[in-house]
Amino acid sequence: MSANLSVEQSLMKAKSYVNKGDLAEAQKLYETILQNFSNNIRTQKEIGALNKPIQNNIIQNPPQEAFSKIVNLYNQGQMEAVIQKAETLTAQYPGAYIVWNMLGASRAQIGILEEALHAFDNSISLKPDYADAYYNKGYALYYLDKLDEAIEAYRISISLKPDNAEVYSNMGVALKNQGKFDEAILAYRKSISLKPDHAEAYDNMGVALKNQGKLDEAIEAFKKSILLKPSRAEAYNNLGNTLKEQGRLDQALETYNKAISLKSDYADACCNTSFIHNLYGDLKKGLELYEWRQKQKSSPVRAPRKNLIWDGVKPLSGKKFLVYEEQGLGDVIQFCRYLPMLKQKGAEVAFKVKKKMHALLSTIDNEIILVDSFPDNDQIDFETPIMSLPFLFNTNLDTIPVKIPYLFANDNNILSWAKCLTKSTFKVGICWQGSKNKIDYGRSFPLSLFEGISKIPNVELISLHKGEGEMQIKGINFDLTILDNNFDTGENAFVDSAAVMMNCDLIVTSDTAIAHLAGALGCTTWVVLKKIPDWRWMLERKDSPWYPNLTLYRQKQIDNWTHVFDKIEVDLQSLIKEKEIQ
């Protein structure tokens, strides 16, 4: 009996693999059963039914009425029902390539992506020239972040069916996400040539144009999208982003609000309005709206659990409070200043952050526990992402905690780097580019712009730069002190950068983590900003309420850095003279 029961359980499991579209696993299990029970007739029949259509490309379409029911359910958005009926049909008609494709599409719609791929592969194995299956496979691969494979699937679909506008549009999105903006725009234009009223393609093309800095062209594309489909909230949101980039902030805010009027729970647009208010210095309203980021699809914030949410009021004495990082390293450095404030309220504070940041962050308060993984729920009384702390502490321009410095370099490291920087010079640590991401456009500038500063007598430029843009060093024709290969290459981030900064007279940097580190250390720092900067730098003012030791140098015109560096050169000469007089 136990042997029979084992066979029965194995057959049920194999059938579940078949229903999921994972025919390879089903085949393995059937073969295992036959190795132990070679005369099992049911297993022989089922493995024969499994293999015959797929191996011989025998197409066994179900009755049209049955398939039409699935299509109607799919069009109604009833994906669970589609999956259930499609799994039944593919078990009855394993050679039904069209049903396998529909099964995959419905699984993909609800995020069962790996199982969707199994279904698409079965469809393609039955009908290798089935363009729709390749198109849908590309969709699943895209959401699995397998962009190269997604683009290849889209290209095969196009080769089989060149007139599908949707494939070109989706391929454009994948190319855009790879930073291949020219190729993406070509794909969008092809999509539009096939479908002139394709509002989504115009919208996506506008995003690619914006990412290239072609703001006027991007605006025209968004307006065309809106004209074709006035209810498209996404196009209004993207238009708002571009207007903000141009400095047309009131128009941007109006456009975001239009997107919200069309889609009241549109987290992206609600969050984007926060940037406008913060730029204007209205932190109270801006930080409250910024909480919408937690509801964005791309949010790095884990879903908040109601019983662990702190409202900024509940007593914290004796409570275990978990804070966790959510975005860039600069954000971690800027907002870790709030951790001691939780401790002052009596909380036992743990900060979940990358291990490489622990050495630097341990200097803020040795009683704050640094961890690199989430504790079990029963070890937490409250939790919050770190960028919610300014909101929870009801921050406005007058209440920003500005105890500077709040991070510290290691004394031994400071002395060690002092021995490497022995010239009797005015030392200027420089950084010209941050990491490549969606906010990088316009905030980085060429290293070559430091040439004028390098020629000021007795000035020594010292590179604090690591990573993106480092190759520019090979193309300059002025002196730049490059630190040895061990600079910040250990397991701890920024410990060398912090020590070198403490040996410098001045830091000049783009808007990157280096700016925040210099600010947190209390170093005299000049930050070079694009015309419309990140929200935390606000507008027009030369100082920063977050870092009193920073001076802000702002573009007057988009992409024009020359006047900024002319001003820096004049101010640096004046600063050196003041130092000499002292």
Image (spheres, rainbow, N blue to C red):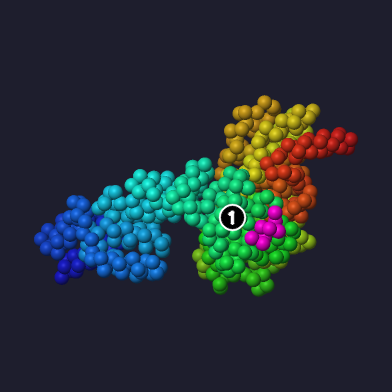
At horizontal 60% and vertical 66% (from top left) the residue drawn is 260
Residue 250 placement, left or right of 163: right
Number of numbered markers: 1
Q: Residue furthest top?
A: 477
Q: Nearer the viewer, residue 314 or 107?
A: 107
- Quadrant for the N terminus, please: bottom left
Task: Please tell me which residue is depicted at 84% across the width and 36% down the height of the picture.
Answer: 574
In-image side of 441 versus 111 (left or right): right
Q: Main secondary structure of the magenta part?
A: helix
In this rendering, is residue 580 above or below 239?
A: above
Q: Residue furthest left?
A: 39
**Residue at image location 31% in from the left, 69% down from the top:** 69
Provide residue 89's location: percent of width, then percent of height: 25, 65
Q: Which residues are magenta?
A: 248-255
Q: Nearer the viewer, residue 288 or 202?
A: 202
Quarter of image, res 274: bottom right
Location of residue 569 in the rendering, given as x and y in whole percent from the top left corner:
78, 35
The quarter of the picture where residue 443 lies is top right
The quadrant of the image that shows the C terminus is top right
Q: Nearer the viewer, residue 177 or 422?
A: 177
Q: Position of residue 132 (x, y in %)?
A: 34, 54
- For badge 1, the amino acid type reads Lys
Quarter-wise, where is residue 294 in the image?
A: bottom right
Which residue is labeled 1 in the image? 223
Residue 253 appears in view: yes
Residue 253 on the magenta segment: yes
Q: Residues within 10 Å of mark 1 (few under 14, many from 20)?
A: many
User: Residue drawn at (26%, 68%), measured in percent from left and top?
Assistant: 66
Q: Is residue 520 magenta?
A: no
Q: Secondary structure at mark 1?
A: helix
Residue 578, percent across and down?
Answer: 86, 37
